Image (tube, rainbow, N blue to C red):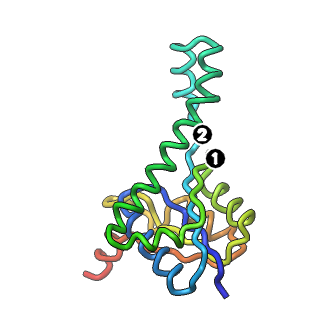
Amino acid sequence: MIRSMLYATDLGLYAPFVMQHALELARTFNADLHVVHAVEPMGLFAESVLQSYLDEQSLNEFHRQGLNTVMANIEQRVLDSFREELGEGMQDLTLIQSVRVLQGDPSQVILEQAGKLSVDLLIVGSHSHGVGAQTPLGRTATRVLQLAKVPVYLVPLVQRRRQGDT
């Protein structure tokens, strides 16, 4: 029985399409829906650029406050995208129990949250990149499929599915 689900969003072009699947599953199973978005840690290049422009105190303050602000803004963006996509169907927002924006490797964040929340199903898109993607599965989707301890509902890339139909 599916009582709770975790929808992992990359906020990419196909995120609204994957979100529709997540909401439909939540409605069908009358399940709680949790949402997670992972923000990859800042790379070495970005960190070195910041170090060249900020003194140590400012850099530490940026890491403390700036990151929290960025994460809160992304969380708000996720909620806003749901509201925009749902339009008249705002009652579906009540299905969403939590929205978390966390920093870390996306597949690790997804799997850790699935464990912490004890969800019964993971919902992910197959790939975050559109036209020109050479692989049927992205890195994150592949890792989640390999390591998940619960079933994974994988939504294929719309463009790839259309290409396969011809």
Disc 1 or 2, which lies upstream in sequence? 2
Left/right placement of residue 107 relative to residue 135 reads right
Above/below status of 106 relative to 40? below
For badge 2, the amino acid type reads Pro
Count neighbours of disc 1 (C-alpha within 10 A) and say few if under 14, some if 14 to 19, many if 20 or more. Answer: some
Residue at left 62%, top 66%?
A: 144
User: Is residue 120 depicted above or below 6 in this figure?
Assistant: below
Answer with left or right where residue 129 lies relative to residue 59: left
Q: Residue at x 29, y 74 (%)?
A: 163
Which residue type carries mark 1?
A: Gly
Q: Which residue is mark 1?
A: 104
- Residue behind mark 2: 41
Q: Is residue 74 above or below residue 65?
A: below
Q: Nearer the viewer, residue 100 or 10?
A: 100
Q: Quadrant of residue 64?
A: top right
Is there CB contact under 8 Å for labels 1 and 2? yes
- Nearer the observer, 151 or 141: 151
Position of 112 with respect to 24 (left or right) is: right
Q: Position of 166 compared to 23: left or right?
A: left
Residue 2 lies, in percent from the top left, at: 64, 83
Q: Quadrant of the C terminus?
A: bottom left
SS type, badge 2: loop
Q: Front-most of 124 and 65?
A: 65
Q: Residue at x 38, y 63 (%)?
A: 14
In the drawing, what numbered circle is on residue 153?
none
Dividing the image into 4 quarters, which one contains the N terminus? bottom right
Q: CA distance from mark 1 to mark 2?
A: 6 Å
Provide residue 130's location: percent of width, then percent of height: 35, 60
